[in-house]
Image (tube, rainbow, N blue to C red):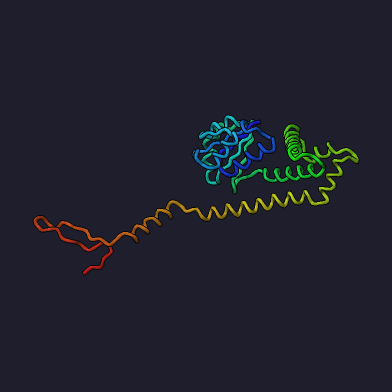
Amino acid sequence: MSVGFIGAGQLACALARGFTAAGVLSAHKIIASSPEMDLPTVSALRKMGVNLTRSNKETVWHSDVLFLAVKPHIIPFILDEIGADVKARHIVVSCAAGVTISSVEKAFMALDALADGGVKMGLPRRLAVRLGAQALLGAAKMLLDSEQHPGQLKDNVCSPGGATIHALHFLESGGFRSLLINAVEASCIRTRELQSMADQEKISPAALKKTLLDRVKLESPTVSTLTRSSPGKPLTRSPALGGKKD
């Protein structure tokens, strides 16, 4: 599996670092595109060994999972550019506020907690992280390949009186399901708030033009203009625009 990031900012850098640190992906399996190659985050990605390009299309060509790690107002232009290159094999994830987003951050938190549990029970941190990542990756692959309901897959792996059903009971008693639902709801509400704030900051071209013209009028000094009188007569000075008549 290969991963691509359209946009090479803080989010792309953080995700790439997380993928490589957890052992989920090697850096050479990651590609990121950015029109600017002198950004600090681009330098950080380069040091990780991530492939870099200025071409968004190239990122699509070399990716199975594609993250749109750009600001919301850029998304339509990106989709227009790469739309024809996105195929059925691609999984496209938008990371922009105000646009449908994935729950990658929740998966990382769950993975971190699983690793902590492993360490508590005596596993080395590196191995605990890797086992947790493999568990999440395996569960996701099983779900995508089988197309069964998650609840059915959960029931399939729970043996009567086994460790799995005991673990699930503990999660349910602690409100695990409700916490995830509330986390998704909180994220959605905040995303809508951010989008609303962004919309309020937008100025229409007509309003912007009017504002600029008004500023020009206010800042322009009062000047007089020269007009030509009838033939044979000298030039006369006319009142400045907006001046009072004598």
Closer to us: 88 or 42: 42
Report which quarter residue 121 is drawn in: top right
Residue 213 versus residue 27 in the image, above or below: below
Q: 49 or 36: which is nearer to us?
A: 49
Q: How many marks?
A: 0
Q: Position of residue 196 (x, y in %)?
A: 57, 54
Is residue 223 visible in the rendered image? The answer is yes
- Which residue lies most toward the bottom here? 246
Q: Position of residue 186 (x, y in %)?
A: 68, 53
Asked whether, in this view, residue 131 is left or right of residue 211, the answer is: right
In the rendered image, which quarter is residue 61 located in? top right
Q: Residue at x 73, y 42 (%)?
A: 111
Q: Quick check: can you spot residue 139? A: no
What is the residue that sits farthest to the right in this orientation? 161
Residue 235 percent location from the top left of the image: 14, 58
> Horizontal placement of 207 versus 40: left or right?
left
Is 35 positioned to the left or the right of 124 in the image?
A: left
Nearest the camera: 83 or 31?
Answer: 31
Q: Quadrant of the C terminus?
A: bottom left
Q: Quadrant of the N terminus?
A: top right
Q: Position of residue 103 (x, y in %)?
A: 68, 44
